[in-house]
Image (cartoon, rainbow, N blue to C red):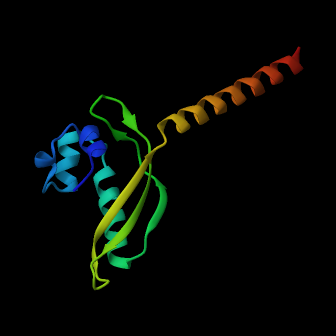
Amino acid sequence: GCNHNVLTMLNMTKEEFRGKTYEELSEICHWPEGLAEKLQNDDLAVLQTGMPIFGVEDPPIPHATDSALNLLTSRVPLRNRNGELAGVAGISVDISELKQARELAEAADQSKAEFIANMSHD
């Protein structure tokens, strides 16, 4: 299952999404090579160990609007009433704007350093 935001990102209905494997989603949504395997391996790690994964930056995920989302994701085990592992819940935060701001700041720092270096040669 998934929430409305994921369905919007994938441009799918809940019925279209239901039952799809990571490989099928990768093909339908034109994910970059290796993304489906990474997402699946993260889920399997939580299922196999029962330990959550917090704050992992996923590779950029294509959005239906031809943009890409940069997501910081945590995955936690879901347990049934008996405490047995029953699934995984993924919680993602869109950090695209944060990444863009960081890249702009790094570019500005680089430009400043180059300006200062050029001024010292004059």
**What is the total number of numbered labels drawn onto the structure image?**
0
The answer to whether one can see residue 100 in this image is yes
Residue located 27% across and 33% down the image = 64
**Residue depicted at 28% across the width and 45% down the height:** 6
Front one among 31 and 33: 31
Residue located farthest toward the bottom when viewing the structure as drawn: 82
When asked about the image quadrant of residue 46, the answer is: bottom left
Where residue 77 sits: x, y (%)?
35, 71
Q: Residue furthest top?
A: 122
- Image: 28 above or below 106: below
Image height check: is 119 above or below 30?
Answer: above
Depth check: give the residue in front, 26 or 84.
84
The quadrant of the rendering that contains the C terminus is: top right
**Residue 95: image x %, image y %?**
49, 42
For this rendering, which residue is in front, 46 or 24? 46
The percent position of residue 51, horizontal first and vertical second, equals 42, 75
Q: Nearer the viewer, residue 42 or 88?
A: 88
Q: Residue at x 15, y 54 (%)?
A: 20
Percent position (x, y) of residue 18? 14, 53
Quarter holding the N terminus is bottom left
Give left or right: position of 121 versus 58: right
Q: State which quadrant residue 107 falls in.
A: top right
**Quick check: can you spot residue 34?**
no
Left or right: residue 108 versus residue 49 is right
Residue beneath the point at 40% across and 42% down: 60
Answer above or below: position of 45 versus 109.
below
